[in-house]
Image (cartoon, rainbow, N blue to C red):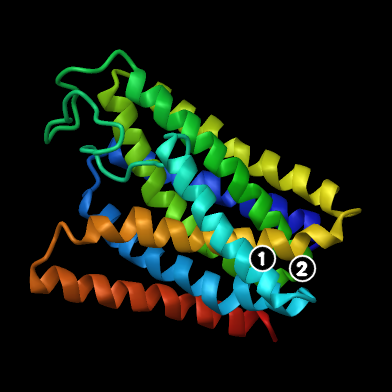
Amino acid sequence: MTTFSWIITASLLGGALSVAFAAMLTLKTRTSWVQMLISYAIGALLGAAFLNALPEALELSNNPARISAIVLFGILIFFILEKLVIWRHCHFVECEVHDPAHSINTNNTINTHDSGRSGMMIMLGDTFHNFVDGILIAAAFIVDVQLGIVTSIAIIAHEIPQEAGNFLILLNSGYTRQKALLFNLLSSVATLVGGMMAYFMLQDMNHLIPPLLGLATASMIYVAMSDLIPGLHKRPEIGATVQQVMLIILGIGSIWLAGSFFNH
């Protein structure tokens, strides 16, 4: 496969898996799966950041200190974006950030809604997030197919529970299941758009690849540490903690194995 084909495949696969998982919620799939996927996604994101993206960026750059500064600056930028509520996304119905008016009951039916405000806000942020993910996936594949694959695994692992949470927020905002699925699908297309644009732009601007890998590292670290890990602390019981730690280790291990396998 060509690099462009890898980018297209990874972008489409991420969108298809996330929308498929959201669709499963309409069949009353156990939402505890979302919590398990979040723990796995933390490990995948941290593994891809520290075992692949950051080492590759440092290797490609003539100034490692500059890459470290970019990672630090990227974390600050993502913090600012989160404060502006265009980056943050929810993984559960009860989201302290977007604060939907009422939650969905156990039958996944809507009690009341907020006239679509939370839904539109979350989809705006999700579309922007997906667009950036597409750019980062493209930058990784341009450097190396192995790096692109492990980066895509980490991003897809995070996208699945993210889109599932978005789906529930859209239902809570008063949208039908069909419209919620459609909006999730349209939002996921932004990953493909970002990937294609980055591919053609980076052909003549290879000097931007190391900084983009630095930003990819910052993105994965920030999402894992700021967005995902705090949610795990809501389940402090020892059994849940052991499960979370094991799934995080599994996420890191799968990234390491994928990197080792595709490197040969």
- Find the residue positioned furthest to the top: 115
- Compared with 107, 174 (above or below) is above
Question: Mark 1 is on which residue type?
Answer: Gly
Would you say the residues marked 2 and 1 are in contact, meaning their CB atoms lie under 8 Å apart? Answer: yes
Which quadrant does the N terminus fall into?
bottom right
Where's residue 92, x and y in %? Answer: 26, 43
- Compared with 262, 149 (above or below) is above
**Residue at the (43%, 76%) spot, across then down:** 252
- Find the residue positioned furthest to the left: 237
The residue identified by callout 2 is 143
Where's residue 81, x and y in %? Answer: 49, 41
- Element type at marker 2? helix
Looking at the image, is mark 2 or mark 1 earlier in the sequence? 2
- What numbered label is drawn on residue 196? none
**Residue at the (21%, 72%) spot, across then down:** 243
In this view, the mark in front (2 or 1): 2
- Element type at marker 1? helix
- Compared with 123, 248 (above or below) is below
> Gap in Å between the C-alphas at discs 2 and 1?
8 Å
Depth check: give the residue in front, 24 or 202: 202
**Residue at the (50%, 61%) spot, across then down:** 220
Where's residue 181, x and y in %? Answer: 43, 30
The residue identified by callout 1 is 148
Which quadrant does the C terminus fall into?
bottom right
Question: Is there any visible trace of residue 189 in the rendered image?
Answer: yes
Q: Is residue 192 left or right of residue 17?
A: right
Q: Is residue 217 left or right of residue 60?
A: left
Q: Residues within 10 Å of mark 2 (few under 14, many from 20)?
A: some
